[in-house]
Amino acid sequence: MVNLLQFDRSGLADFCAELGEKRFRATQLFRWIHQHGERNPAAMTDLAKSLRDRLAAKAAAVPLPVASEQVAADGTIKWLFDVGDGNAVETVFIPEPGRGTLCISSQAGCAVNCRFCATGHQGFNRNLATSEIVAQLWYAEFELRRRLALAPGERAVSNVVMMGMGEPLQNYAAVVPALRIMLDDHGYGLSRRRVTVSTSGVVPMIDRLREDCPVALAVSLHAPDDALRDELVPLNRKYPIDELFAACRRYLERAPRDFITIEYCMLDGVNDSPAQAEALLALLRGDDSPLRPGLSCKINLIPFNPFPDSGLRRSSPARIAAFAAVLQHGGIVTTVRRTRGDDIAAACGQLAGEVQDRTHVGDRRERSTAARAEHRIAAPASRRESAGGRGTERTLP
Ligand code: SAH
Ligand code: SF4
């Protein structure tokens, strides 16, 4: 059975052509699937009976099985979708007055292995297919429309953020058609400003996204310098901050917004000192180097959301407020992300789903922790002191 959720409109037109149908039929079909939530071609009544029969024999919009649903005290909903072979991915709906944001996964696990992320800790199994990415939105939209008894034409999901499990720009080939389906006026009709790709900094793919499908971009920075970012976001060793910022500036030439969102996870004693706030400000304004211009951005500080065995702590509210004040006084719009759904482990970085790790990240982590422990002899007594100044040695737990 061909899963119709895998096709953007031009892919669906190709599929219609393969069936010997006119390509424009794809638009009708696409609307049935993504505007009416219809799974079964036999029920698409304005298509010719012969086409319906041929389609029904071969194809359907096949959703992902829901393994579980949890609803948090604040109304946040987390679904766990079964993607087979013991893997499951999580999707989170965050209701707010006047909008509904859906946080979508792009991979079963993640290979980037950021130090502070539950998904990274789980390792990596595989990329999701376009149909599996779109199925998360399809289910949420039509399930919520039904539950909330929305009037025809009313939408449940107004914003999509690719901030669930996985690094979307390491699954580029599947993510781009999924984005096109979200943006298509005959599909979900979301504006480019309301669809955000969040990346840990896959520089070449930021450039490709700029050409292929520029949507709002969020970049997970988390550190004011390469030395610390190398430790927190291992991808930084391949694409250091200067290269990342250059790619962001190129992206802005085509982006639907005139700023990049910088995400910065607040880790107690690791990246949250006043000196690090100053360093971050200088980095973003380009004050620290005559060769590098600043970056047009807004900052979103994310209080670290703990997960088992992370060995890290969330910065205190006072520390976060002081950090934010430095940036704000420096002229950079700074927000602190409100934690949503943490009672059901649905907050940023807590998504773990079920991942049959094929990368043995757990084994590698144990080895590197042991190696770090051997080299820790010179570490200062307090982590906060060690993280305070730039250029001083930093030791992560
Ligand atoms: N892989 C992409 C998108 C998924 S993560 C990326 O890294 O950008 C979405 C956001 O949650 C990222 O900014 C990520 O750094 C942040 N995050 C990860 N773990 C977190 C945690 N434990 N607490 C708070 N934020 C976290
Ligand atoms: Fe992957 Fe993003 Fe988590 Fe890093 S923060 S491990 S890139 S999902």
Image: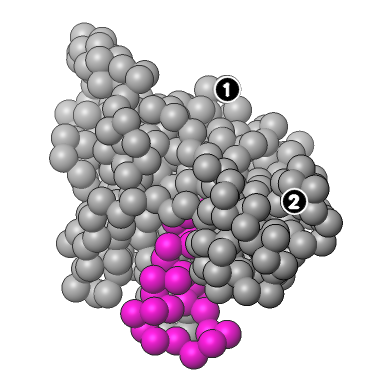
Position of residue 136 in the picture relative to residue 218 (left or right): left
- Where residue 322 appears, as percent x and y from the top left, is 36, 61
- Where residue 208 appears, as percent x and y from the top left, is 74, 39
Which residue corresponds to the image point at 80% horizontal and 48% vertical from the top-left? 20
Residue 223 is tagged as: none
Q: Is residue 155 magenta?
A: yes
Residue 388 in view of the camera: no
Position of residue 214 in the picture relative to residue 123 (left or right): right
Contact (Cβ within 8 Å) of mark 1 with mark 2 = no
* Residue position marked by numbered label 1 in the rendering: 238
Which residue corresponds to the image point at 37% horizontal and 41% vertical from the top-left? 83
Which residue corresponds to the image point at 22% horizontal and 47% vertical from the top-left? 306
| CA–CA distance in space, label 1 to label 2 | 42 Å
Q: Earlier in the sequence, mark 1 or mark 2?
A: 2
In this view of the protein, which residue sits in the foreground, 233 or 393?
A: 233
Q: Amino acid at mark 1?
A: Lys
Which picture quadrant has residue 292? top right
* Residue position marked by numbered label 2 in the rendering: 16
Query: Outermost residue toward the bottom?
Result: 151
Which residue corresponds to the image point at 30% horizontal and 54% vertical from the top-left? 66
For mark 2, does the 10 Å Cα neighbourhood hold few (<14), some (14 to 19), or many (20 or more) residues? Answer: some
| Label 1 element class | loop
Q: Which residues are magenta?
A: 134-159
- Where residue 36 appears, as percent x and y from the top left, is 55, 73
